[in-house]
Image (cartoon, rainbow, N blue to C red):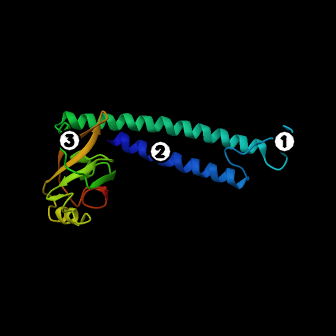
Amino acid sequence: MERAQSLMKEIAALENEIRTLESDLKGMNATRETSLVDAEGFPRADIDVAGIREIRRSLICKQNDLKALMSQIEQSLISLHQGAQDKGVPEPKPATMRRPFARIGKVEINSPASEAGLLAGDKVVAYGQANAGNHNKLRLLVEETSSNIDKPIDVVVERVVDGQPQAVELKLIPRRKWGGDGLLGCFILPL
């Protein structure tokens, strides 16, 4: 878990460096695609060709570093979720034909949503008493959450596993002091 958080910080720093370099390019009246030669094939005299090439080289290196970090965080998260499955997080079951009504957005690390096994992209089929027919523009989810602080809520999500939708039953326990904002640590968006 700590490894994933460390990688996330490195990614954020690298993305800031990339934005700075792109801003520097823009300040030189150039982009990543700006031609550095004129129509006759000679270096352009109206721009700093050497400076632009150096920034482009740095951008390429930073992009490659970012891809490597993304790959490392992907492996770290796979290991983390594999460990969660080994500790008893339920296996997906074939999806029942209940209709999803919401989608899970970003899930914060170490949050109640993360600990329950929710993943970004999961589609909510049932959330306590809420379902596609009665959620009232997700208001019932808010009521279920606020009235069940420190108590488990039965949640059923539809998750695509190996290209097939699967129903996954989870127990989500909303709580206040988990180290982040909100009671769940995730965004729930209407479909």
Task: Choose the circle earlier in sequence order: 1 or 2.
Answer: 2
- Quick one: label 2 or label 3, which is nearer the N terminus? 2
Name the element at disc 3: loop
The residue identified by callout 2 is: 11
28 vs 156, left or right, is right
The x, y position of residue 50, in whole percent, is 76, 41
**Residue drawn 34% across and 42% down?**
2
Image quadrant assignment for residue 129: bottom left
| 1 vs 2, front mark | 1
Question: Total number of numbered labels?
Answer: 3
| Dots 1, 2 in contact, CB < 8 A | no
Residue at disc 1, secondary structure: loop
Eye-nearest disc, 2 or 3: 3
* Marks 1 and 2, how far apart at CA: 39 Å
Separation of marks 3 and 1 at Cα, in angstroms:
60 Å
Q: What's the residue type where badge 3 is placed?
A: Ala
Looking at the rendered structure, the kind of residue marked 2 is Ile
Q: Mark 3 highlights which residue?
A: 95
Confirm or deny contact between disc 3 and disc 1 (CB under 8 A): no
Badge number at residue 39: 1
| Numbered label attached to residue 175 | none
- Say few, some or many: other residues with alpha carbon within 10 Å of mark 3 (under 14 / 14 to 19 / 20 or more): some
The quarter of the image holding the C terminus is bottom left
Residue 54 placement (x, y as % from top left): 70, 41
**Local crowd size for mark 2, using a 10 Å CA cut-off: few (<14), some (14–19), many (≥20):** some
Of residues 97 and 191, which is closer to you in this image? 97
Nearest the eye: 63 or 131: 131
The amino acid type found where label 1 is placed reads: Ala
Helix, strand or loop under label 2:
helix
Ranked by sequence position, the earlier of labels 3 and 1 is: 1
Q: Quadrant of the N terminus?
A: top left
